């Protein structure tokens, strides 16, 4: 990517970056929810 192309993409960059951070936040939150459910399932499994 040349400097010229980078400048052309600049105006929409903050919105895309914010959207990426929201997506990352939801993704990590979801991973933790799944992890806690799996830990609960394993620790409370009938023997």
Image (cartoon, rainbow, N blue to C red):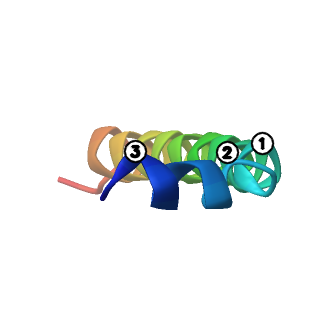
Q: Is residue 24 left or right of residue 42?
A: right
- Foreground residue, 34 or 7? 7
Secondary structure of the residue carrying tag 1 is: helix
Q: Is residue 1 left or right of residue 33?
A: left
Residue projecting furthest to the front: 4
Residue occupying image coordinates x 33% and y 54%: 2
- Callout 1: 10 Å neighbours few (<14), some, many (20+)? few
First of labels 2, 3 by sequence position: 2
- Callout 2: 10 Å neighbours few (<14), some, many (20+)? few
Residue 35 picture location, percent across and down: 40, 44
Q: Is residue 45 left or right of residue 41?
A: left
Question: Count the marks: how many?
Answer: 3
- Foreground residue, 5 or 14? 5
**Mark 1 or mark 3, which is nearer to you?**
1
Inter-mark Cα distance, 2 to 3: 27 Å
- Callout 3: 10 Å neighbours few (<14), some, many (20+)? few
- Foreground residue, 1 or 15? 1
Q: Which mark is residue 45?
A: none
**Mark 2 or mark 3, which is nearer to you?**
2
Disc 2: which residue: 17
Residue occupying image coordinates x 35% and y 40%: 39
Secondary structure of the residue carrying tag 2 is: helix
Residue 16 picture location, percent across and down: 71, 56
Inter-mark Cα distance, 2 to 1: 5 Å
Residue 24 picture location, percent across and down: 57, 46
Disc 1: which residue: 14
Q: Quadrant of the N terminus?
A: bottom left
- Foreground residue, 45 or 32? 32
Disc 3: which residue: 35
Is the residue under label 1 in contact with that under label 2 (CB below 8 Å)?
yes
First of labels 1, 3 by sequence position: 1
Residue occupying image coordinates x 65% and y 60%: 8
């Amino acid at each position: 990517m040349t400097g010229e192309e980078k400048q052309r993409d600049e105006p929409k960059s903050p919105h895309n970056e914010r959207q990426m951070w929201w997506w990352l936040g939801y993704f990590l939150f979801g991973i933790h929810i799944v992890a806690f459910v799996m830990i609960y399932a394993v620790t409370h499994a009938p023997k």
